[in-house]
Structures are given as structure tokens and as C-alpha cells.
Image (cartoon, rainbow, N blue to C red):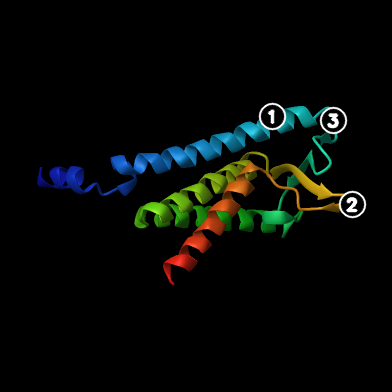
Amino acid sequence: MNFIKHFKEKSILPLTQKNNYIYLLIIASIFFLDRYSKIKIIKNQSSENVIYLNDFINLDLVWNTGIGFGLFSSNSNIIYNSITALIGSIIIFLIFLIIKSKNIDKFFFSVILGGALGNFYDRIIYYAVPDFIDIHYQKFHWFTFNIADIFITIGIITLIINDFFKNE
């Protein structure tokens, strides 16, 4: 009986505490926004090659079997599965960081995790990540990316900036 009381008071699983529900909501919102955008683009791209938005942005579906920016893309199942396992391990580590972090860092890690879960889901379901945002200027094209990549990048950059100013 004493253990149950201690469990309720201290909450052995910190993510079940009321003040952490906001972070779960952030993670879920990013994940579902990413899923929604990818479902829409996959349905629309089946009939068109490129959706022209303006002189700088096109929507062009590309299936990425590697990691960010198509690095380590390969037709090898061993490489693909190894990368997927590594990403799964990083996701578990991010969950640990969210549990152990305080306020603003917890927010940044949640933003990264929301995006990472979106891309991880695609790796498991589609065996590739659909990237579709093509930013370009004349003949120069940046790497094609997706909504999850945006949140991962924003989370990492803001975490680094926050850490830089925290240490000064």
C-alpha cells in the first residue's frame, strides 16, 4: 500500500505528470501535422510530377531511404535497417532527455522528437521517408525536405542557441 502511495505522489513515470501533458501534446501535434502533410502530398503527387507554388518553392515528392538530406541512401537492407535501428535508439534517448530535462530544453527536445517520430513512422511503414518541399533559386536546389525535418532542424538550432547563451 505504501508503494502505491509513493507511486502516485512521486510518479515513477515523469511523463504522466500533469505538467508534462503539454509536451506530449507538442509531440503529437507535430507528428500529426507531419503525417497530414505527407498523406496529402502522396495522394496529390500520384497524378502530377511537380506542383509549382512560386519561383522559389515547388512540391516534388522524393522518397528518401537515407537520413537527413539523403545521406547514406542505399538499396542495401542491412544499411537501411542499421540506420533505422540507430534512429530508433536516438528516439529512445530523446525520450530520456525529455524526462530528465527542465522546461525550455524539454520543449526543444519535444519538438525534435515530434519530427523524428514522423520520419521514423515513414521508415517503418513505407521503407522510405517522403520528402517534398523543394526550395530553389534558378538552377540551384536545396535538399528536398518535409515538415518533420523543419521541426527537427528548428529544435536542434534553438537547443544549440539556448545552450550557447546559457553557458555565457
Residue 81 as seen in the image, left or right of residue 45: left
The foreground one among 105 and 47 is 105
Taking 50 as reference, is 123 above or below it? below
SS for dot 3:
loop
> Mark 2 vs mark 3: which is more N-terminal?
3
Assign a secondary structure to mark 1: helix
Along the polypeptide, which appears first: circle 1 or circle 2?
1
Residue type marked 2: Lys
Mark 1 residue type: Lys
Q: Could you tell me if the residues under marks 2 and 3 are in contact, i.e. CB atoms within 8 Å?
A: no
Q: CA distance from mark 3 to mark 1?
A: 13 Å
Query: What is the tally of numbered marks visible in this picture?
Result: 3
Mark 2 falls on what kind of element?
loop
Which quarter shows the N terminus? top left
Image point (18%, 45%), residue name: 9
| Disc 1 target residue | 40
The residue indicated by pointer 3 is 48
Residue 153 location (% of width, % of height): 60, 53
* Between 43 and 103, the one nearer to me in the picture: 103
The nearer-to-camera label among 2 and 3 is 2
Residue bearing mark 2: 139
